[in-house]
Image (spheres, rainbow, N blue to C red):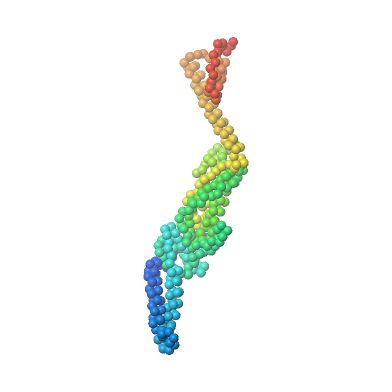
Amino acid sequence: MTGKIARATEGASVEKSVRVRSGWPMLAILLIVTALCVALIVSGVALLPPDGVPIETGMQVLGVVLLVVGIVSVCVAPLLLLMGFFTIQPNQARVLILFGDYKGTVREEGFHWANPFYSRKTGYTVVNDKPAALSTKVSLRARTYNGEHLKVNDKCGNPIEIADVIVWRVENTAKALFDVDDYNSYVHTQSETALRHVATTYAYDQMPGEPEGEITLRSNIEEVSAALKEELAVRLEKAGVVIDDARLTHLAYAPEIAQAMLRRQQADAVIAAREKIVQGAVGMVEMALGELSRKNVVDLDDERKAAMVSNLMVVLCGESDAQPVLNTGTLYQ
């Protein structure tokens, strides 16, 4: 068995990549050993005297010895050899632990055989209030964790509901098994902690009086997701876990302030729309007065211009259709 030690940060477990024997030759040896044990039993039985006849000769004593050795061997040797077989699927690894001593990690897929005394469990954790054993086999495949909806306060102190989804995988098996108690629970806990921290770093939405261009949870999803991914990467590095992606899946104001914030957003939208309408109306009035003056259609003094501006602004900015009025007099009568 050969191994190569990979570098790791100081104070963290170091993963060793090792190679073990193929399981197929050892399977053939298992069959040969079993056949030999059966042969010993048969030979011992053949040398024994008939039933009821006492053992008197050396060959008969040898028969007893062969029988005992054969029975013990057929019960122990094949069992020990069988305990050494294991398989590794693609994107899977097995950590080898011998009496508490970490020997290395096997990442090569296939049918293998190793020391039968290697541990198959690394400890125990609690799942649904019940103890569950932690296997030495570690999946290296990408996993998805959908976080629960959390109620937190944003940067401005507004209560919000937020949830995330992260895609993660184990990169360093030694860290995953030896540096944390249960890396699955560790990922779930740190995911919630990181999400809470990111949620309190940014405001839910742009608030009045805040500088323009500030990153918010609602308007800057990409930036917030990148910050969440970076936060998780730092927190989960101790467990040998890398984050492939992290996204927000739910974002809303808490129910107790949702209606008030909705009215504020509606008011902001109405104000923005009114501002756009007024800007457009002013431009159209300016264009109309300029065209009338340039083409000498009518000569308007300041008072008539003011009246025309007032009428045009009412027509352009009003929500209902304008009603025509026939003026039979003048502005001065």
* In this rendering, position of residue 74 left or right of residue 229: left
Which residue appears at 45% of the width and 55% of the height?
141
Of residue 332 and residue 22, the one placed in the foreground of this image is 22
Of residue 93 and residue 214, the one placed in the foreground of this image is 93
For this orientation, the residue located farthest to the front is 52
User: From this viewpoint, is residue 128 visible?
Assistant: yes
Which residue appears at 48% of the width and 14% of the height?
297
Of residue 224 and residue 159, the one placed in the foreground of this image is 159
Of residue 6 and residue 184, the one placed in the foreground of this image is 184
**Residue 94, how many percent across, how many down?**
46, 62
Which residue appears at 44% of the width and 87% of the height?
54
**Residue 73, how many percent across, how many down?**
43, 76
**Residue 324, how many percent across, how many down?**
53, 17
**Residue 270, how many percent across, how many down?**
56, 31
Q: Is residue 67 above or below residue 305?
A: below
Quarter-of-image position of residue 212: top right
Q: Is residue 227 above or below residue 289?
A: below
Q: Is residue 32 above or below residue 255?
A: below
Which residue appears at 58% of the width and 11% of the height?
332
